[in-house]
Amino acid sequence: MKKSVLIEDLSWTEFAGAIAQDNIIILPVGSTEEHGPQSPLGTDFFIARALARSIGEKAQALVAPAIPIGNAQGLLDFPGTISIDPVILADLVFEVCENFIRHGAGRFFFVNGHGGNNGALRHAASALHERYGVFVAASEWWTLMPKISEYQAHDHGGKFETSMMMAINESIVDLTKADTKQMEKLTDNIAFDYGFFYRGAAVSLNLPTSMITPRGNFGAPSEEARREIGEAMFEIYTDYCAGLIREIRQIPDGRRY
Ligand SMILES: [Zn+2]
């Protein structure tokens, strides 16, 4: 058992010893952005960090310091939201991992807390593989949850994300302020359901979230959030990812440099 799975808790000698034993690193990547009036700006960052820590403890894998800022451009109408360009995020993730590779890392597991980070993380993963041959896996709890559980997690600051936040720190969620109001139609023929649909097929429309919801949340109603739902999802997801990491350790890392 390690003293701590969090890299920031270790001395450099402890880190060097740990990475020599097991060269996978979990990297939580979040965002600081509005999540409706009931939830903290740090929701995606807190969730990614807590999930990564639990996965690390269950799999006894090292966990990097969480990246608290991501690409949240569509949410910038809401005060307190911070967004960086996806190119900068991809570069940041690439360089953080590059440092770890220099010190012995050969595999990475990205725990993403925010959908807007997807493109940047995919880019960083392929660039790391291309340059160093290292193996990068990435996971998002909300896309996995409907496939491995009964929870149809499908919202932004709604029932499921707010529940997950409550499981992590209920004291900074104020459910009395939860009241989801969102548009159902953009035009007569374009519907909104966690994305836009024209004649039943998803279409990509890069519109600010403030156009869809004046309160900043959408999807399943935040009023229905419960800590117990979040706790159940937390355990299901972290068990799944810890199991996946045990499998990943059996795959050659492909390091070359
Ligand atoms: Zn979120």
Image: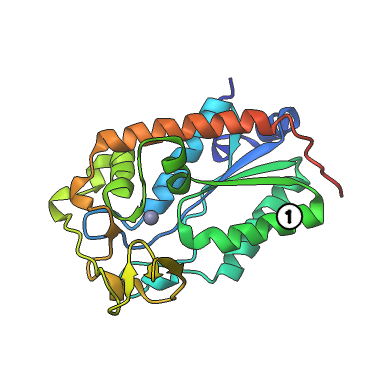
Q: State the image coordinates of residue 255 (x, y, percent, origin top left).
A: 82, 44
Q: Is residue 73 above or below residue 232?
A: below
- Figure colour scheme: rainbow
Ligand 1, by image quadrant, is bottom left
Residue pictured at 36% horizontal, 45% vertical: 152
Residue pictured at 61% horizontal, 70% vertical: 87
Residue pictured at 47% horizontal, 58% vertical: 115
Residue pictured at 27% horizontal, 73% vertical: 185
Q: State the image coordinates of residue 212 (x, y, percent, origin top left).
A: 29, 71
Q: Quadrant of residue 35?
A: bottom left
Q: Going by the picture, which residue comes out furthest to the top? A: 1
Q: Going by the picture, which residue comes out furthest to the left? A: 176
From this viewpoint, is residue 5 visible? no
How many labels, in total? Answer: 1
The residue carrying mark 1 has its beta carbon less than 8 Å from ligand 1? no
Element under label 1?
Answer: helix
Q: Is residue 53 above or below residue 41?
A: above
Residue receiving disc 1:
128
